[in-house]
Image (cartoon, grey):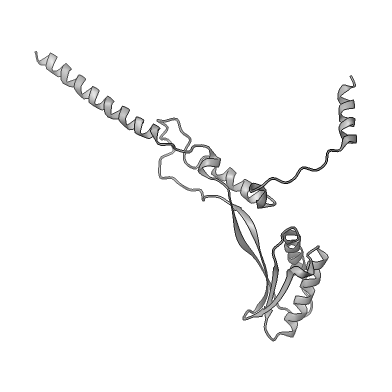
Amino acid sequence: MKRTIWLGSALVVTMLLGGCTNQFYDERMQAYQPELPHQVYPIEVVKGQVRLRIPVRKGNLSPRDRAAVRRLAQDASSKLSTIIITRPAGSVRAEVHAAEITRLLADEGVVPSRIVHRTGNTDSIVISYRRKFAVTTECGDWSEPASQTAQNRPYWNFGCATQHNIAAQVDNAEDFERPRLMSEPDAAARNMVIDKYRKP
């Protein structure tokens, strides 16, 4: 009799636990949870400001300063935003540096109409312009243990580093918003490839 009661109680407890487990998994499965890296860490395009500080020194700009200005100009030449050169007010040396910076920008293809000069309360020359950046959510979410794989889902940080690398390497963040137009096909090159393919 006792054995029968014990078996019956164990069966009831097992059924109750099974019902709770099924209810738990049903609730988790009904709610959509993103799993792929581009869903958990989507790449977004935001606007930000690029700043370059050039110290006011005696004489002309240093080779390092010139190289920094040229790199900025090469990046800004493909953008349509205005480049603002802010120099210290009342400094003749800063005016000379600002004029040299303007020539460097023009040499790299920046249209002079896009360059604006200002004076401000600063101890160095600041070159700035606005552009679009590709960003994504920061990594490091360890709210759940990585060994918890009862639902066979990837851990929360899966693919985060890859998404960050893609966002950092893209040359023009606007490519995420709209694709570039395709160039015209080269018929001569196409025929050459087809001929090589057909030859045994």
Q: Nearer the viewer, residue 61 or 183?
A: 183
* Residue 103 place in picture, x, y as percent: 81, 71
Q: Quadrant of residue 42?
A: top right
Vertical comparison of 71 with 1: above or below:
below
Quarter occupied by the N terminus: top left
Quarter occupied by the C terminus: top right
Q: Residue at x 77, y 68 (%)?
A: 66
Image check: 188 left or right of 63? right
Asked if residue 58 can be seen in this view, the reply is: no
* Residue 31 place in picture, x, y as percent: 40, 36
Image check: 193 left or right of 156? right
* Residue 186 place in picture, x, y as percent: 86, 38
Image check: 16 left or right of 104? left
Q: Nearer the viewer, residue 59 or 46?
A: 46
Asked if residue 178 can be seen in this view, the reply is: yes
Q: Quadrant of residue 90?
A: bottom right
Q: Residue furthest left?
A: 1
Q: Nearer the viewer, residue 83 or 4?
A: 83
Q: Residue at x 72, y 63 (%)?
A: 72
* Residue 198 place in picture, x, y as percent: 88, 22
